[in-house]
Image (tube, rainbow, N blue to C red):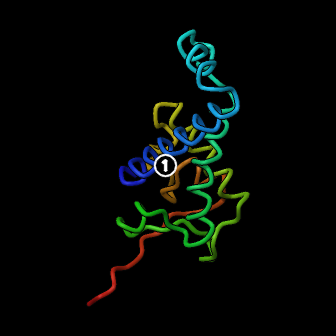
């Protein structure tokens, strides 16, 4: 999870920079400076939405194609359906949204694996998916 966090931070920094460059081209540098100094751009809902979509895109791409983010590859785990197939985009969206809710509940959704008989977190349960360990390949 830490590896994905670092990748997401880098992705959000780049996205934020591109967003601000586009915004500056649209409203002009002088006006941008004035709005920034006055705090008028704080809490920009479009900016927050763009960042949220970029984050979802990152996870959805990896989860629906290979079942693994780069961080999951390092740890040898994969998200999949019970039959071993890849999860759908809808499942990825559910997984993403419920994992945000888990964070907002002080991580309770992640600690749920300690009480669930099948060792599933909230986002596993609601997206009807599961995390599995991938056996290491012998060299």
- Residue 86 is left or right of residue 70, and the answer is right
List the single residue furthest toward the right: 90
List the single residue furthest toward the top: 38
In the image, residue 22 above or below residue 93:
above
Q: Residue at x 33, y 80 (%)?
A: 136
Q: Residue at x 51, y 59 (%)?
A: 118
Which quarter of the figure is the C terminus placed in? bottom left
List the single residue furthest toward the bottom: 139
Which residue is at the front of the view, 32 or 4?
A: 32
In the image, residue 7 above or below residue 66:
above
Q: Quadrant of residue 74?
A: bottom left
Pinpoint residue 7: horizontal percent, then vertical percent.
42, 52
- Residue 73 is left or right of residue 122, and the answer is left
In the image, residue 46 above or below residue 75:
above
Which residue is at the front of the view, 67 or 41?
A: 41
Residue topped by disc 1: 11
Q: How many marks?
A: 1
Q: Quadrant of residue 30?
A: top right
Pinpoint residue 127: horizontal percent, then vertical percent.
66, 55
Q: Residue at x 55, y 44 (%)?
A: 15
Pinpoint residue 60: horizontal percent, then vertical percent.
62, 58
Pinpoint residue 85: horizontal percent, then vertical percent.
63, 76
Q: Residues within 10 Å of mark 1 (few under 14, many from 20)?
A: some
What is the secondary structure assignment of the residue under circle 1? helix
- Residue 129 is left or right of residue 131, and the answer is right
Q: Residue at x 63, y 14 (%)?
A: 40
């Amino acid at each position: 999870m830490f590896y994905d966090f670092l990748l997401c931070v880098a992705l959000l920094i780049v996205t934020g920079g591109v967003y601000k460059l586009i915004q500056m081209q649209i409203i002009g540098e002088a006006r941008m400076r004035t709005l920034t100094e006055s705090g008028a751009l704080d809490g920009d809902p479009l900016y927050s939405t763009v960042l949220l979509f970029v984050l979802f895109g990152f996870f959805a791409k990896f989860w629906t194609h290979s079942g693994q983010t780069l961080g999951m590859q390092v740890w040898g785990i994969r998200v999949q359906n019970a039959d071993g197939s890849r999860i759908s985009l809808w499942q990825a969206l559910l997984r993403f949204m419920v994992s945000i809710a888990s964070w907002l509940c002080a991580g309770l959704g992640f600690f749920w694996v300690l009480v669930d008989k099948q060792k599933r977190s909230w986002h596993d349960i609601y997206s009807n998916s599961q995390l599995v360990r991938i056996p290491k390949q012998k060299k």
